[in-house]
Amino acid sequence: MPISLLCKCGILLFLISLHQQGLAQVTGEVNVLDPDVFYMHYTPPNVITDDFEYQRFSGKLSVPPLKNGRLTLYNTFGLDVHLFNYKNNRPEQNSGELNTFYNLNYSLFASYAFSERWSVNVFAAPFLLSNLEGSFEEEDLRFNGTFFIERNFVLKNGGYIRLGLGTAYITLNGTTQITPISQAKARFNEQWSMVLGLPNTYVKWDFHKRNSLKGLFDLNDFSANLNGSSSFGQGVTADRAVFTVVSAGLEYNHWITQSFGLLLRVTGGLWNSYELRNEDNDTAFTFDDDLTQPFVSVGIKFNPVRELQNRLFPSN
């Protein structure tokens, strides 16, 4: 299949699915073929608008899978820290409550394989997303989850395609809903692979044993509870901050050893929004979200099971 066609299909399906599916609040390697066992990513304050500078720390740690017959359980712990440094045209009072937002998350992925071709899967992800100012509130805790069935199609010349259909309980751009989902994963040969879905859509080229390049779409989305005061000056009363960035770009991975690697990612914003909203999810204040600079992120990763993940036949 021509790579240009794959890219066009990826762009089209990603844009169509943006309002239909995903696990937006639980970011990272949720829907990928080769998740890392551990990673840390950092986006320095190179993301600037007239109102704020933005930076982010992210990390994930997966414990070894637990397998019992046809059932396999995957446990992952993650932390995202979003930091804002404000400048002009913003609510002045109690600004410290808008500076740092934390997303502490846990996910359990359970896969039951009926056969080599069919499996039923459950993804459950409780998480805490808040500025953590003042006392703990019930609204700090959230939940995302999906239930879907996957079917593997083995290609005659090596490789496979994996299709999934199901339903999800998700929060996207501040709105929680139950929605149908679809996703696709494919490994065509030793060099080319592809994923369509949210929060990950990409085409990957493993052009060397220790080097790879991804063309990707990236979704950075959170809806954080505002603890402490709900009054932010200028007549603004709000209960949460909602930040959403849809971007596209390239990611380069270099593996220093078989298991330890480095990452460089550069993306440009396609659609951005940063708002303060009240308890009815109505907009109380909108920050300037004209992100003209690209997002530049660096990271380290550890993955001792890369060879197993890169095999040309599916495994659970």
Image (tube, helix red, strand yellow):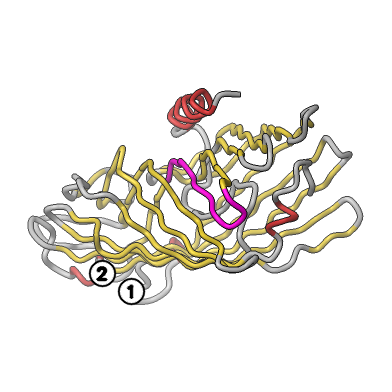
Q: Could you tell whether 261 is left or right of 56 in the image?
A: right
As drawn, 41 above or below 246: below
Give the percent coordinates (x, y) of residue 115: 89, 39
Q: Main secondary structure of the magenta part?
A: strand
Which sits earlier in the primary sequence, circle 1 or circle 2? 2
Task: Give left or right: position of 165 versus 203.
Answer: right
Residue at label 2?
97
Give the percent coordinates (x, y) of residue 316. Answer: 79, 49
Q: Which residue is mark 1?
A: 133
User: Is residue 100 or residue 213 the one in the foreground?
Assistant: 213
Residue type pointed to by label 2? Glu
Q: Is residue 136 visible?
A: yes
> Which residues, given as a range, are shown in magenta?
208-218
The secondary structure type at the circle numbered 2 is: helix
Q: Which residue corresponds to the image point at 52% horizontal and 36% vertical from the top-left?
A: 21
Q: Residue furthest bottom?
A: 134
Query: Dividing the picture into quarters, in which one does residue 106 lie?
Result: bottom right
Residue 225: image tag: none
* Res 68 quadrant in image: bottom right
Residue 210 magenta-drawn?
A: yes
Crowding near the residue tagged with mark 2, few <14, some 14–19, many ≥20 C-alpha atoms within 10 Å: some
Q: Are marks 1 and 2 in contact (CB under 8 Å)?
A: yes
* Mark 1 to mark 2 CA distance (whole Å): 7 Å
